[in-house]
Amino acid sequence: MRSIAIFGATGSIGGSALDVIARHPDRFRVSVLSAHRNVEALAALCARHRPELAIVADPEREGALASALEEYDLPTRVASGPFALEQAASDATCDTVIAAIVGAAGLCSTLAAARAGKRLLLANKESAVMAGPLLRSALAEGNGELIPVDSEHNALFQCLPPRCNDVDARGEVRRLWLTASGGPFRGRTRGQLAGVTPEQACAHPKWRMGRKISVDSATLMNKGLEVIEAHVLFGVAEPAIEVVVHPQSTVHSLVEYVDGSFLAQLGQPDMRTALAHALAWPERIEAGVALLDPRTLSLQFEPPDAATFRCLALARQALRAGGDAPALLNAANEEAVAAFLEGRLPFLGIEQVIESALNELPPQPVVDVGSLVERDLTARRVAARIIRDIR
Ligand code: NDP
Ligand code: MG
C-alpha cells in the first residue's frame, strides 16, 4: 500500500491524480493534500479522500481551513506555510509525493521529497528547469526515484532503458523527440497574435490544464521548459533534443536510437495515463482513460514555427548559456504570464520580457537553494520593471 502526498491537490494534475488513486483503494492511500489558498476545495477533497494531513501554503488561510474541515467532522490534521510542505515531503507520513504545484513555488517541496528518497512523481517542471543540478544531487543523495508525469517525459521514460538518467553517457540514443500540439495559435502569424486574449490563450485544443501552463503552451514556452526538463531528467545535451509539432497529441514523444529504431509512446491526451503509469510503475493499472483505436489514427508531424513563437528559442538559449540562466528564464516567464493573464501585458510582450531580462542578467553558477531563490527574486524584479516599461 503506497501512501501518497499530493502537493497542488486542488489543481488540474491534482484532480487527475486523485481520480486514478480513487480507482485503486487496494493499492493507494491519500496521506497528504495541499493547496495554495483554496481551502473550500481542499476541505471537500479531504472529505472525499480522508488524508492524515491537509496543508494550505498561505499561512493566513490556516484558520479557514481548520473551520472548513470541522464542518465535515474530519480527523485530518492541519498545517500551513511552505515549511509544512517540506516537512510532509520528508517525514514518514508518505512514501510517494506527487509534485503538482505550479511554478517556482513547488521547488523546495520537490527538492525535499528527492532528498528524502521518496518516489517523486514530477509534474512541477519549473523546479527541474530552475534547479536541475540541485534536483539531480538531491535525487542521488536520497537514492529515491523520480518518475516524470509531464506527458512527454513520461513517454520518454517509458521508451528509454529503466532508470536511465545518463542517456548521453550510454551512447545508445541519437535524439529525443518531444512532441508539441502547437497550442491554440498554431498556424497564426505574428500580426494575428498581437491582440489575443487570456481566454483564447487558455482554450487549448487538446488538453485541459491550469491557466499558467495553458499560456505556456500557447507561447511554446511550455516546449522550451520541456527541452530543459528533458536535459535535466535524462542527461541529454540540448542539440540532441528535438521538438516536433504533432497536432493530434497522440504520440507523446519519441526516442531515436543509434541503430535507427524509434520508440514512441501513444495514448489519449489524458494525464491520467501518465499518472497511473508513474503511480504503479513498474506495474500497470487501469487509468479510467477512453479507449484509443489505432484504426482511426491519422498522424501528422511538422517543424515548430520558431520565428513566430520565439519562446522556444529563448529557452534553448538559456539552456546553452548554462548556470542559473534557466531559473532566470523561468522567473521572467512566470512574471510575464501572470501579467498577461491579468491584462497588464500583451501576448507578444511575454517573449519580449523574457528576452530583455535574460540580456540584463548574465548567468551565475547554481550553488544552493538560497542563492537560487535570491536570483529568482532578482529576475522577477527585473521582469516587473520591463513589464511596466512596455505599458
Ligand atoms: P493548476 O493551476 O491547475 O493547479 C496548481 C496547484 O498548485 C493548485 O493546487 C494550487 O492551489 C497550487 N498552488 C498554486 N500556487 C501555489 C503556491 N504559491 N504555493 C503552493 N501551492 C500553490 O496547475 P496544473 O495542475 O495545470 O499544473 C501543475 C503543474 O503540473 C505545473 O507545473 C504544470 O506545468 C505541470 N503540468 C501540468 C499538466 C496539466 O495537464 N495540467 C501537464 C504537464 C505538466 P490553489 O487551488 O489553492 O490555487
Ligand atoms: Mg508536457
Image (cartoon, rainbow, N blue to C red):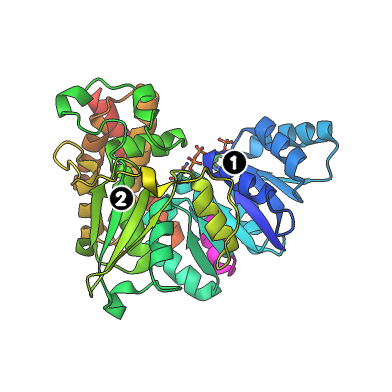
Which of the image's four quarters has the C terminus? top left
Residue 389: image location, x then y, percent: 24, 27
Magenta stretch? 109-118
Residue 207 makes an appearance in the image: yes
Residue 362 makes an appearance in the image: no
Residue 354 in the magenta stretch? The answer is no
Residue 317: image location, x then y, percent: 20, 53
Crowd rating for badge 2 (residues with CA inside 10 Å; few <14, some 14–19, many 20+): many
Q: Which circle's residue, 1 or 2, is located before the other in the chain?
A: 1
Residue 15 shows which numbered tag?
Answer: 1
Amino acid type assigned to the residue bearing label 2 in the image: Thr
Residue 110 in the magenta stretch? The answer is yes
Q: Quadrant of residue 156?
A: bottom left
Compared to residue 123, the image places residue 204 above or below, namely above
Residue 173: image location, x then y, percent: 27, 72
Residue 179 shows which numbered tag?
Answer: 2
